[in-house]
Image: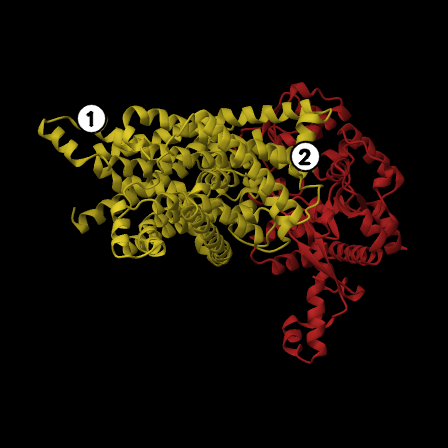
Chain colours: A red, B yellow
Amino acid sequence: MTRFDISRRHLMQMGLGSGGALALGTRGLRAQDTSVALQLSWLHSVQFAGSYIADERGFWAERGLSVRLDAGGPNAPVEPPVVTGTALVGVSAADYTAAAVQEGAPFRIIGVAMQNNPFAIASLPDNPVNEPKDMEGKRIGMPLANMPVLETLCTLNDVDIDQIEVIPTQYDPAPLVAGEVDCLLCWSTDLPVAMYVRGIASVTMLMADFGYTLHSQTYIATEDSLANRRADLVALMAGEVQGWEAYRADLDAATDLTLARFPDAGLDRPTQIEQARRQVPLMFSDLTDANGFGWWTDETVAQNIETLALLGMPVEASLWDRSILEEVHG
Amino acid sequence: MTAPAAFARHGAAALGLLLAWHLAAQALAGSHMLAGPLDVAVYLATHHALMGRALIVTLENAAWGFLAGNLAAVGLALIVALMPRTRVVVAAVALVVFCLPLVATGPVLRVLYGPGPGPQITLAALAVYYTSFIPLLVGLRAAPASWFDLIRLYGRGAWTAFVQIRVMAALPYLMAGLQIAAPAAFLGAMVGEFTGADRGMGVLSIRAMRGLDVEATWTIALVAATVAMLAYGAIGALAARLSPARPDILLATAPAPAKGNPMLRGLGLAMLTALVVLALWWALMEAFALSRFFAKRPDDIWRYLISAPTAAANRATLWAASVETLRLVVPGYLAGLGAGAGLAMALVLVPWIAGAVLPLAVALRSVPIVTTAPLIVLALGRDTLGTITIVAVMTFFPALVACIQGLRQAPGQALDVMRIYATGRLTQLWHAQIPAMLPAFFAAARLSVPAAILAVTVAEWLATGRGLGALMAMTASTSNYNMLWSAIVVVAVGSALGYALVAWLERAVMARVAPEQLRG
């Protein structure tokens, strides 16, 4: 990445770069930009629209930063590229970050995009799960990897987990629609949206409403970056904050931008706009209205630590480092 | 058969298939499992541009991987041809590397390469090199001694002999390998996209699966299968032009003649292979200075599974997942082999069904399992039947092709004698053709071991969420890389053991029915 900039600068000094600079557009002229990467946690979609806005509207460029947005996927863990420095920042979640820290990764959470955890129990209206107690006697479809999540939800709500039949499925709404299971453990912003767009009504019980407090879509960086690359981190997070505020202000524009930017990703507008709508209440709250996007308080961290302890991942409050956000919002 | 008659028959078969597909889709309407031919046509008509762009991306990566993988296969085969003593170890190490599970190698490759098509190309290459390497090995040795005598008579050296005889003799075998490799490369490139890509058929199929977009899923499966079949046909046509004489036995590499105690030899080979693999593992990680956070070394795994206080619990988790996987992979593997051999025999008895059955078999093999695994599991049940079926589909095709070839090896004179004595078709099959088929059958059985493992882990990962496949996916996302690498070791060792077991069975059966095959 840095190598690119040097060669570009060389070319321009030698007067040979005009063609290249033209081809690269105006951003190509900013030879002094620092290049960093942000590792996303999933395939490109409106889930990361704030970042696309930050890029397209130059919120990073005006801070001297050029950010490459690396797509994630079902077989693309976020943590390794951040540990190795391929990406300066990664979009993780509090539980994944805690697990990585247990395994020795030197991570800190420097921002929280989703104040409310998107995990939900989706069911069909004629056999609904409106509260955790309703799960008793039902078949739930979920990856076995999420057992600790279900156990935690049951502990928090006094539900007898032995009364629930767990059917291992992967991330796919079909088993619910086909009647193979009565409910699914999923994100409120994806499988229910898929069903909605296909004209299948569903009931979504957000786990965050029943005590499952866990930050999601958390920005993580290494301790080394926090010590030595503060300026880049501040610039990156400032662009993110500005991008997500713009997202909230105009969901349609954010959706259109996403669709235009990734014409080959197989995205469709009805799904994307619905997902964009449904993630707003997860990302913005009174807390962020008062303090700014990405914020947290000692109180929310304490609740997170409690949930993580139930998940079998004891962490310290020092896992969260607000110094970057304080500089951004300062 | 005249050309128009054949055409009519193929046409009727295709129409029949389409009708069956349409009726099945009608019967399952509303279940979001199967999209009919009309739905697929409508989807293609409205999304052809998107599908075309995705196809080009994935095809390009698959093509580069196909090229790289086959070059690697040729390189390995040359090493073995020039230094025959290395044969057994090179083949064993190549097998272990081929058995590394995609679920686990994907993320590691992504970190190694960073963004871009690197993992897609590498996974495609890894998916093809072994199935090209093995036929090449056979091909390079498939020259009669008299040809070499001829070269010597003309006073030419070893190099001429190599180029004029070995390379030429190996060509048809290489082509046979390339044919099998084409769908595998496409699948590898698609799975590579799961490690983080902007576009391609793999990206579209993830999107379709989660979006309950059955039309898209089936269109992707169909387009991918069509492309794979076209590649299969094109390579077949090319092979026919280059060397009209097809190789006699497609895949069979005669088991090495046993010298001394076979048990001891096997043990020695296993130790040597393990040493080479461990050294490669270590050296690669050190050479690229991979972070110990995710790139675990052999000593990390030793601690995790043997010497750490939690080792017993770790082993128990791994063991439970392995047993679960084994319970599915063994029946699926046996069913696939049985179906392949059974169908090949049916084709001998009732030759005219070949026109309908063979294209269907190629199609089944060409459909990328990452797209269809979730649907098959949904349709057939996630307990056992779905996964067993997926494994069977993956092992069925190599067995079928090899057995058809093998059945043709029955000596003509023997069959003539039987016919003169008015021996029934079944008796001919039993006494002449099946014994002739066995070497090819066992060769396919050996080659299918890694394919079966691939199928079961993919099904567990994408559809059922249990066993080793799910364990590997889960540990990668929760940063439990010690467990991930331990699972890789189990899968690689298990596949190699399965391969060795089949080879041992092969030797035992051959010694009874076809001892001439065992002569060196």
Near-viewer residue (A220 or A329): A220
Nearest to viewer (mark 2 / mark 1): 2
Residue placed furthest toward the bottom:
A15
Near-viewer residue (B264 or B2): B264
Residue at the spot 60% in from the left edge and 40% down from the top edge: B279
Residue at the spot 88% in from the left edge and 37% down from the top edge: A299
Q: Chain of mark 2?
A: B
Residue pointed to by mark 1 = B426
Q: B15 left or right of A206?
A: left
- Disc 2 and disc 1: Cα gap in Å? 57 Å
- Describe the element under mark 1 as helix, strand or loop: helix
Residue placed furthest toward the right:
A330
Rendering quarter of residue B404: top left
Q: Looking at the picture, which amino acid does disc 1 mark? A: Leu
Image location of residue B253, percent across then percent down: 36, 38
Image location of residue B164, percent across then percent down: 31, 55
Rendering quarter of residue A62: bottom right
Q: Is residue A177 visible?
A: no
Above or below residue A35? Residue A106 is above
Q: B502 left or right of B169?
A: right
Mark 2 Cα within 10 Å, few/some/many (few <14, many 20+)?
Answer: few
- Describe the element under mark 2 as helix, strand or loop: helix
Mark 1 Cα within 10 Å, few/some/many (few <14, many 20+)?
Answer: few
Q: Chain of mark 1?
A: B
Near-viewer residue (A290 or B4): B4
Image location of residue B330, percent across then percent down: 46, 26
Q: Looking at the picture, which amino acid does disc 2 mark? A: Asp
Q: B72 left or right of A135?
A: left
Count numbered badges in the picture: 2
Image location of residue B138, percent across then percent down: 36, 43
Residue pointed to by mark 2 = B299
